[in-house]
Amino acid sequence: MSQDEAAHPETIDVVIVDDHRIFRQGLQINLDFEKDIRVVGQGANGEEALQRVRELQPDVVIMDINLPLMNGIQVTRQLVSEHLSTRVVMLTAYDDAEQMMHAMRAGAAAYCVKEIEPEKLIEVIRHVHQGRYVVNDQVFDRSGIERWIRKGIESIAGQYYADMAETFSPLSPREMEILQYVTRGLSNKEIAHALQISHQTVKNHMTSILRKLAVEDRTQAAVYALRRGWVRLNEPLPDPGAKNTD
C-alpha cells in the first residue's frame, strides 16, 4: 500500500458511464484531483456499465440515463435486483421531475444534471458513499427519500391515479422491450409476432406500462420514452431470440 493510500483508507472507488468519451475523460480529470476518490473504470453503454460494476465492484457508479443498449434506469434496476452494493449517481441532461422520480424509484441514490459544478458533484459522491440520498441539492436518509418519493408521486400523479403503488415504478425488461417496439409504431399484434409471445401478453404489458408512466395511451408512452432518452431510434430492435421473461 502506498503512503497516499495509507493516509486515505476511505478511498471511494468510482466507475463513470457515459457514451461521450470526452465527457467521461473530463469528469475523470476533475475527480482525479480528489485524494479520497479513485476512478477505477469507465463504460460507454448500459451493458458495459453492468459489466464494469460486476467486475470492479465500485462504491459508486456515475451514470447517464440516455445510454446505448440499455438506458441508465434499466441498468440501475438490474443492479438493485442483483443486490450489488454499488450506489448509483444519475448524471444527466434531463432536468425533469418525472424522470427524477423514475430514477429514484429504480434505486438511484442521487440525481444530478450535467450542469452541476464539479465541487457539488464531489459532495454528492461523498454523501452517497456514506449511505445518503441527494436530489435537488437536498440530502436525505433512507426514510427521508421514501417520504420524498411518496410526496412526489402524489404531487405529479395523485390527481389522476387513485392507486399509485405502480406509478413511476421501474419498467421490467420485457416492458422496456415492448416500449421500444411501440416507439417504432408497431401494433400490439405486430409486437406479439416479433417477440413470439401472445397478443394478450402484450396487452397486459401495455396496461402496466401506461400505469407506470402515468400516461393515457401508447402514443403518449412512446413520446414519454423518446423525450427522456430511454429509447434510441437509431438502434436495432431487441433480438426476440434473446432470453427474457414475460
Image (tube, helix red, strand yellow):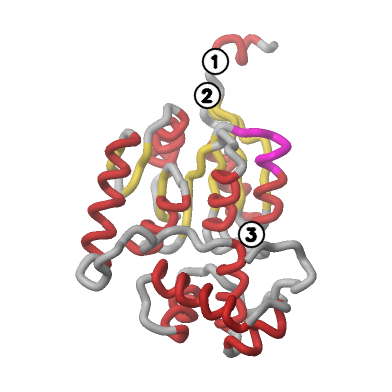
The reply to whether the C-beta atoms of the residues labelled 1 and 2 are less than 8 Å apart is yes
**Residue at position x 50%, y 77% in the image:** 206
Read off the residue under disc 1.
Answer: 8
Q: What is the quadrant of residue 33 in the picture? A: top right
Q: Which mark is residue 36?
A: 2
Residue 102 as seen in the image, left or right of residue 11: left
Read off the residue under disc 3.
Answer: 19
Crowding at mark 2 (Cα within 10 Å: few <14, some 14-19, many 20+):
some
Marks 1 and 2, how far apart at CA: 6 Å
SS assignment at label 3 = loop
* Residue 171 drawn at (x, y percent): 51, 63
Q: What is the quadrant of residue 187 in the picture? A: bottom right
Viewer-nearest residue: 189 or 11? 189
Q: What is the quadrant of residue 185 in the picture? A: bottom right
Crowding at mark 3 (Cα within 10 Å: few <14, some 14-19, many 20+):
some
* Residue 93 drawn at (x, y percent): 45, 62
Marks 3 and 2, how far apart at CA: 25 Å
**Residue at position x 65%, y 80% in the image:** 198
Q: Which mark is residue 218?
A: none
**Residue at position x 52%, y 59% in the image:** 65
- Is residue 230 shown above or below 195? above
- Magenta-tinted stretch: 52-58
